[in-house]
Image (spheres, rainbow, N blue to C red):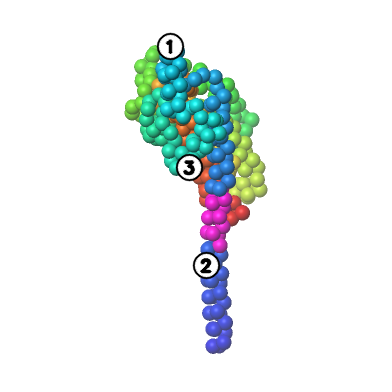
Amino acid sequence: MTRFRSLLRSRSFGTARQARDGGQDRRGGLTRRLLGRVLWALPALWLIVTMVFLLIHIVPGDPVVEMLGEGARAGDIRQLRHALGLDLPLRVQYGRYLGGVVRGDWGASLRYHQPVLRLVLGRYPATLELAVAALAVCLLLAIPAGVAAAARQNRPADRAIAVVSLLGLSVPNFALGPLLILVFSVEIGWLPVSGRGGWAHLILPAITLGAALAAILTRMVRAAVAEELSADYVRTARAKGLSERQVLLRHALPNALFPIVTVIGLQFGTLLAGAIVTEMIFSWPGIGRLAVDAIEARDYPLLQGCILAIAISYVLVNLLTDILYSLLDPRVRFS
């Protein structure tokens, strides 16, 4: 009996030790996976910075002439170009810019005469607020519509949702924005025309920016949920007597979230980059409008800073998407 108890105790201790070691291995695997994703993101950021630097300098136009005017003297132009370092070879300018980005010094704006990082951080909250609101509008429209269409496949409701989603894809935001302003601001007078203030100022820009993504996501939700509804475990759940609502919300939709999260993670970065047109339509003081101002003024450092901020945001969103994968599907967590 004593030998049996000691053997049982040793086995229980061994099982506990194996579970503890397994948990540590899993946490270590998750850490290595996330670290690997971060390391893979660095070359992508470097490539983006390099391409933006080269493309901006290829664009016709002289920022010094834009600052001094076309009637400026040649000596003044040469002096300002030397002071800004624009007379240096392109590889020297690139080396200085890349070293500054690594140190957190994004240069100074040629137009505003302020640090680029300060200007970008001052406008970034507005763009992030607009992107998050557009994503919220997208989710509120797409998930219920996609689930309803999947539950009523090939019925009038499914066809109506398909027509509406096709309309959302067909109308670009530069046409939808003015149309919403004309209806809800000019004719009805419910919402303000432009600017950033309370929640009322956010409704029309968020709808304009999120409409196309809502149409894409509606089709994705519909396809993913319809595929899950044809699975064997759903037929088993129905055979057990579960209602159709329980089958949809407790079984089909949670298992369909994996491809949906993929689209949301990829498209959120697109919302940040695609906010330029929407910000111009509604005079929204974000990074997109700042980038347009930088293009008009040939402000190279400021435009590079705006694009770099959007690129970093895109990479971070994809990293957060990977983390969310791990929470939704343990099979991905340690692969």
Hey, which residue is sitting farthest bottom in the picture? 2
Residue 152 to residue 38: above or below: above
Q: Please provide the residue range marked out in magenta.
A: 25-37
Res 258 → quadrant = top right
For disc 2, the marked residue is 20
Nearer to us in this view, 258 or 205: 205
Q: Is the Cβ of the residue at disc 3 closer than 8 Å to that at disc 1?
A: no
Mark 2 or 3 closer to N-term? 2
Nearer to us in this view, 43 or 281: 43
Total tally of numbered discs in the picture: 3
Residue 71 circle label = 1
Nearer to us in this view, 186 or 32: 32
Magenta span: predominant SS is helix
Residue type marked 2: Arg
Q: Residue at x 58, y 37 (%)?
A: 47
Q: Secondary structure at mark 1?
A: loop
Residue 102 circle label = 3
Residue 175 in view, yes or no = yes
Residue type marked 3: Val
Task: Tell me if residue 32 is in the magenta stretch.
Answer: yes
Between marks 3 and 1 in the image, the one whose residue lies nearer the viewer: 1
The picture places residue 128, in percent across and down from the top left corner, at 43, 34
